[in-house]
Image (tube, rainbow, N blue to C red):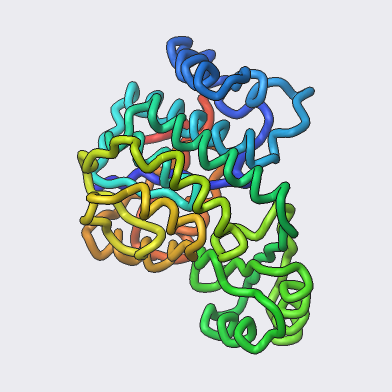
Amino acid sequence: MNIILFAGQGSQYSGMGKDICEKYPDLYDLYDKASEILGYDLKKVCFDESFTELSRSLYSQPAIMVTSLVCFEAAKKNGLTFSAAAGHSLGEYAAMTATGMLSFEDGIRVIKARAEAFNNAISDSEPGAMAAVLKLDPQKIEEICSQTEGYVVPVNYNSPKQTVIAGDKKAVETASASLSELGARVMTLNVESAFHCKKMAEASREFYNIIKDISFKAPQVKFFSNVYGSELTDFSDIPSLLAKHIISPVKFTDELTAVKAAGFDTFIELGPGKTLTGLVKKTLSDVNSFNIENASTLEKASF
């Protein structure tokens, strides 16, 4: 059984989505529709190498989401079928749109609100820091963070040997040094703030107030959640869940384990990069995984 996956922030790159749109020109319409809602030219953001602010949350979040949905629509033209969906952080919004929880237009309105709330939070407070920790069990990382002076917590459980920590810059640096002494490989991430922790509380509140009246439907297929690390079955208050999502850890390792336990054996990543494909391979055995991000990977895909 197939599950589709959508990656989060950090997967963006200049030119993403362009050659798929050249292959299927009708998909340019998704960028045009999004641009009308966003108030700027999203094709320029994604395709123009002279645009230097693609890494900013304000632009990267809508850009990644729309490009992911462009890849999704192109894959459907080539025979894609699926029975479940999931995303990593920002990727959950593309997953919600792909599964019918949101219309495309409302999906763009929601991601616009999220991007702007993130941008405002980054502008108004000490941004904090994030670091990826490799080659160490998450339990040991949790222990070191809890023993570190200041605020630092695990926020992305990406694979059994890859966890991201976030918090106040000094605390993240102290924890990183301690983790390195234990043999971990630690990489400071080039991000604007400390995502998925309490430092984003103001963004969470602002975001909720904007999206609380948007209509969300139950998905047409199974949907797996970062917040719970399992299948989501209660769709009664998605705005509150998404607000919680901003300040909660991404339990992606648990999520992948739950997906496999539910009988899914083929993981198809749609959108820029192949980060999630790599995480699947590091976390699960006896499954298939591949990504579709451009015309070349689309041609190689087998559904």
Front position in the image: 243 or 220: 243
Front position in the image: 231 or 16: 231
Residue shown at 60%/22% (left/top)?
42
101 vs 197, left or right, is: left
Point out residue 299 in the picture as x, y percentages from the top left corner. 45, 27
Residue 290 visible in this rendered orientation of the protein? no
How many callouts does the rendering have? Answer: 0
Front position in the image: 85 or 112: 112
Which quadrant holds the C terminus? Answer: top left
Front position in the image: 248 or 198: 198
Residue shown at 40%/46% (left/top)?
5
Residue 131 visible in this rendered orientation of the protein? yes
Residue shown at 51%/14% (left/top)?
32
Point out residue 155 in the picture as x, y percentages from the top left corner. 55, 66
- Find the residue positioned furthest to the front: 209
For residue 22, above or below residue 228 = above
Point out residue 218 in the picture as x, y percentages from the top left corner. 21, 43
